[in-house]
């Protein structure tokens, strides 16, 4: 008799079976972790192309954020080492994009702190995107500018932006435990506005916030309903001065179990390892043998990342084909 891991794996590969909440919980607690990871990797190989993508991010405006996200060093409500900086200049933005292409990074996102980028700041960043589109035509640009309007999404698309990034972070139910200055639904509405405007979506979350396995599964199921082109998986890196500075770190096996369960729920998706990948050791290598199939390379806003050269070498060694 087949166990649940083998049964669900075969159903997913054969007919794109959609794993439900109860089945996902059973997968999470399956005793043989190695078998779970191997099955997730087999689903990835069957349902995803060998081609993978590496992207990077630019911190285009740092700190002085009025929101109270408990994990974030950029909130002005917490006393952290984060040093606020103004909006990036046009020439600096273009130069960073040129360097990304030099390092064989085909996609780059400009990220700003704050609830939403509006007014003159937003218009300035539109100019940056227009210049990048003109001077770095081979680079695919993404934006992460907070909870902005549908019209702003249309403006971004017209300026050459391809994809909008906005994480749901965690389940709808757990979200009020990590942020009270805006709602989970506002984040979802932002994603829907971006999709309506014709932008691709980059949307995922953070694990290790104190959420339960059930919360992580609920997040994955919500992501399945939105079907983002890219799903970043972040592992909390506790930052001194934030309310979560003493959060208990997730063990390596728990992180890999989460990645594997996400792959069962999202068999076709690009699961992109982001912040916290280094906590797995060996540059996060095991994540790419447990269901993950893409990554964010370079420095990650307020925590350090890895070098593009090391990341590309690792992916090629594992049999991936970086695009």
Image: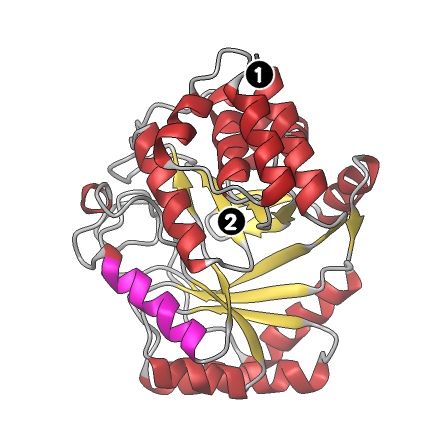
Residue annotated with mark 1 = 2
- At which x and y percent is residue 217? 38, 37
Badge 2 marks a residue whose secondary structure is: strand
Could you say which disc has been placed on residue 318 in the image? none
At 64% from the left and 77% from the top, the residue drawn is 94
**233 lies above or below 140:** above
For the residues bearing labels 1 and 2, Cβ distance under 8 angstroms: no
The answer to whether residue 81 is seen in the rendering is: no
- At which x and y percent is residue 40? 61, 31
Quarter of the image where the C terminus is located: bottom right
Please tell me in which quadrant of the rendered image residue 86 appears.
bottom left
Q: Is residue 193 magenta?
A: yes
- At which x and y percent is residue 106? 71, 64
Badge 1 marks a residue whose secondary structure is: loop
For the residues labelled 1 and 2, the Cα–Cα distance comes to 32 Å
At 59% from the left and 23% from the top, the residue drawn is 6
From the viewer's perspective, tell me whether residue 289 is left or right of residue 259.
right
Q: Toward the viewer: 92 or 20?
A: 20
The answer to whether residue 43 is seen in the rendering is: yes
Residue annotated with mark 2 = 232
**Which is closer to the viewer, label 1 or label 2?**
1
Residue span colored magenta: 185-196
Q: Is residue 34 magenta?
A: no
Q: Residues within 10 Å of mark 2 (few under 14, many from 20)?
A: many
At 34% from the left and 54% from the top, the residue drawn is 74
């Amino acid at each position: 008799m087949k166990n649940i891991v083998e049964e669900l794996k075969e159903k997913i590969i054969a007919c794109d079976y959609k794993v439900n909440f109860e089945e996902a919980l059973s997968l999470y607690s399956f005793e043989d972790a190695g078998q779970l990871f191997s099955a997730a990797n087999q689903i990835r190989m069957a349902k995803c192309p060998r081609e993978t993508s590496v992207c990077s991010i630019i911190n285009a405006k740092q700190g002085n954020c009025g929101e109270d996200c408990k994990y974030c060093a950029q909130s002005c409500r917490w006393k952290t080492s984060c040093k606020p900086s103004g909006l990036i200049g046009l020439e600096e933005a273009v130069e960073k994009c040129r360097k990304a292409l030099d390092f064989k990074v085909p996609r780059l996102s400009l990220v700003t702190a704050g609830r939403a980028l509006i007014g003159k700041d937003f218009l300035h960043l539109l100019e940056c995107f227009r210049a990048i589109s003109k001077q770095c035509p081979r680079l695919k640009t993404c934006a992460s500018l907070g909870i902005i309007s549908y019209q702003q999404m249309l403006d971004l698309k017209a300026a050459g932006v391809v994809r909008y990034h906005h994480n749901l972070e965690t389940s709808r139910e757990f979200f009020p435990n990590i942020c009270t200055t805006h709602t989970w639904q506002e984040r979802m509405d932002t994603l829907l506005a971006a999709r309506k405007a014709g932008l691709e979506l980059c949307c995922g979350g953070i694990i290790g916030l104190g959420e339960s396995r059930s919360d992580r599964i609920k997040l994955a199921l919500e992501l399945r309903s939105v079907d983002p082109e890219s799903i970043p998986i972040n592992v909390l890196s506790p930052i001194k001065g934030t309310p979560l500075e003493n959060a208990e770190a997730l063990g390596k096996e728990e992180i890999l179990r989460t990645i594997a369960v996400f792959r069962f729920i999202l068999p076709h998706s690009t699961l992109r390892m982001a912040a916290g990948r280094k906590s797995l050791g060996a540059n996060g290598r095991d994540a790419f043998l447990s269901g993950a199939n893409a990554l964010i390379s370079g420095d990650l806003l307020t925590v350090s990342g890895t070098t593009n050269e090391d990341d590309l070498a690792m992916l090629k060694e594992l049999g991936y084909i970086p695009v």
